[in-house]
Amino acid sequence: MASKAPAPLPVGARPIVWTIAGSDSGGGAGIQADLATIQDLGCHGCSIISQITAQSSVAVSLVESVSDAMLLAQLDTLLADMPPRAIKIGLLGPGQVSLLAHWLATRLADYQARSHTSVAVILDPVMTASCGDPLGTRAPADGASFDPFAGLLSLITPNYAELALLDGSQVEDFAGFEAAAARLAQRLQTRVLAKGGDVAGRWLAQESCDILILDEVAGSSPLHQHCRFSLTSPRVATADHHGTGCTLSAAIASALAAGFVLQDAVVLAKAYVNAGLGQGYAPGAGAGVLGRCGWPQRLSDFPRVRYLDRDNPAPLAFPPLQRPIGVYPVVDSLAMLETLLLAGVDTLQLRLKTDTDPGSDSGCGSGSGCGSDSGLDVGTETGMAPAAGAALEADIVRAIALGRDHQAQLFINDHWQLALKHGAYGVHLGQEDLAGADLSALARAGVALGISSHGYFELLLARQLAPSYIALGHIFPTSTKRMPSAPQGLDKLRAYVRLLEGHFPLVAIGGIDRHNLAAVKATGVDAIALVRAVTQAESPAAAYLALSLAWSEAVCP
Ligand SMILES: Cc1ncc(COP(=O)(O)OP(=O)(O)O)c(N)n1
Ligand SMILES: Cc1nc(C(=O)O)sc1CCOP(=O)(O)O
Ligand SMILES: [Mg+2]
C-alpha cells in the first residue's frame, strides 16, 4: 500500500469542493465516495444530495429524487457561506439537469462575476450502477439528456458505455471511441475525459486507456492545449471497483480546487484511483469499493501519456550526470560563463536568447506582466538573422571549449543542433523545444538532456524520455521569463520530489535566491537553478560561492 502522506496543502487552507450527487446507501459510490475522496485529497467537501438510492453491492431497489425546492435550497444555502472552488456533479434525475444547468448559468455565474473567481465544474454522467441496475438520467436515443449543460462545464467524464449512450452510436474500436468523444466535446462545448476502464474485451484487455480531449486550458503550456492525449495504465485486476467513476471525478475536482491545471488534475486523479483499486475491499457480496490511499506518490500509479494528434518520441535514454549538481547557474553571456568557471562552478547552463526567438526574454523586466502567456516559446535557430546565427555558433563553440577545459557539466539551452554539432556535454530543452528537437540524435551522441516541467502532466511527459535531469518550475514568481503557468510554490514542489526522487535528479528553478534557498532544500530537491541570484549580483562569482555554501549547509530532512 502507498504510505499515507499529508496532502501537499497547508491544513486550515482546505479548498471547498462541492459534490452534487446521489446518496449510495452502500457507501462505496455517490456522495459517500466523493466526500471520502475530497477529504483524502486535503479539501473540504460539501454535499448537495440530488437522489437517494436504496443500494447495496448487488442491487438498487429504489431511487427517489429530492424535491426541486430541496435541491435549490442546498445550493443557495451553501453558496451564501461556503462557495466552492470546484464542483463535481454526479447522479441527477431527468428534471434535475435543466434545473441545475439554469442554476449554474445564473446563480453560480453571478457569484463568479462578483468574486472574480472561476469555479471548475466536472460532470460525471452517471447512468447505471456498477451492479448493472439503472440510475437517474437515461440518455434518450439521440443522447440529448445533458445538452442543457452545454457551455457550462469544465470537463465531462463518460465511461465507454455512457459515451456510447450519449453519442447514440455503436462504438466498436479505439478510433470510434475517440470520434465519439470528439463529438461530445463539440456538442457540450467542453473538454472530455472518455474513460476506457469498461472497454475490456472490446479492444483492450491488459491496459486501461482513457482519451483526454482539450480545448483552451488557462495556465498550461500552449503546446498542451487544443489537443488530444491518451492516458494508459496497466489494468488493475480487481472486482472491487464500485465508485471508481465517482472517485475519479471528485479527485479531479479536488485537484483543480487545490490549484492544479486540468491536465495535472486528471493524471493525479487517475493515480489516486489506481492506488485505490489496488487496495479495494468488499464489504458486501457484490463488487467491492476502492481503498483510500491519500495523496498519490507512487510513480507506477500515474498513467503513460501520449499525444493522439502528434508524433510521440520513441523510447530513449540519456546519460546520467557525472556528478550531483547542487547550485546550477544559468547565464546569458560568455563573459559570465568564463567568470563562473574560473570561480569553480562545475555545472552551469548557457542560455542565449536572441530578439528573434519567440522565447526571447526581451520586454520581460520586473513588473512587465511576465506571469502572462507569451505564446509558444520555441527557442530554435529558426527566424534568426545569418549574422546572429554565426555569432551564436561562435559563442556556443567557445562555451563548449571552455566547459571542456574546466571539466564542467555545461548545458546549452535551446540550441540543440549547435550543441550536437559541436559535441556539448548537455542540452536543456523546455517542453515546447522538445517538439522540434531530434532527440534520437542527441541520445545516440550521448549528449546529456535536461527537461523543464511545470506540473504533474509535464513531469510524466518528461520522465518518459528518460532524461539526465528534470527541472521543476517556476517555484516562485520570476521576472526573468514570461511563464504561462502559475508559480508552483513549495508544497507542490515537495509533492513532485516525493514522486520522482530516486528516479531522476531534480532541479528547482524560478525565483530562488539566498532568502528562500533553505526552504527549497527542505523539500528534498537535489539542485537549484538560478539566473538573477547569480547574474545580477555585484560579484557573480562571490554570489555563487555564498549560495553554494548556503546550499551545502542547508538541511534536507
Ligand atoms: C534548469 C532549467 N530549467 C528550466 C529552464 C527553462 O527552459 P525552457 O522552458 O525551454 O525555457 P527557456 O530557458 O528556453 O526560456 C531552463 N532553461 N533551465
Ligand atoms: C528560465 C526559467 N525557466 C523557468 C521554468 O520554470 O521553466 S523559470 C526561469 C527563470 C529563472 O530565473 P530566476 O532565477 O531569475 O528567477
Ligand atoms: Mg527553451
Image (tube, rainbow, N blue to C red):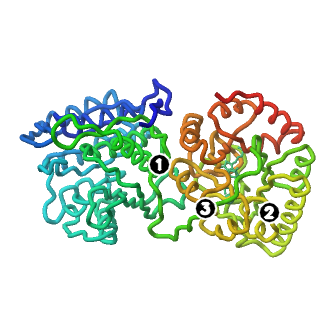
Q: Is mark 3 within 8 Å of ligand 1?
A: yes
Q: Secondary structure at mark 1?
A: helix
Q: Nearer the viewer, mark 3 or mark 2?
A: 2
Q: Mark 1 = which residue?
A: 300
The quadrant where residue 148 appears: bottom left
Sequence-first tag of 3 and 1: 1
Q: Mark 3 = which residue?
A: 432
Q: Tell me the kind of residue under disc 3.
A: Glu
Q: Is residue 27 left or right of residue 95?
A: right
Residue 385 to residue 539: above or below: below
Badge 3 vs badge 1, beta-carbon distance below 8 Å:
no
Q: Nearer the viewer, mark 2 or mark 1?
A: 1
Q: Tell me the kind of residue under disc 1.
A: Ser
Q: Is mark 1 within 8 Å of ligand 1?
A: no
The quadrant where residue 552 appears: top right
Q: How many marks?
A: 3
Q: Tell me the kind of residue under disc 2.
A: Ala
Q: Residue at x 68, y 65 (%)?
A: 443
* Residue 104 at least partly seen: no
Q: CA distance from mark 3 to mark 1?
A: 25 Å
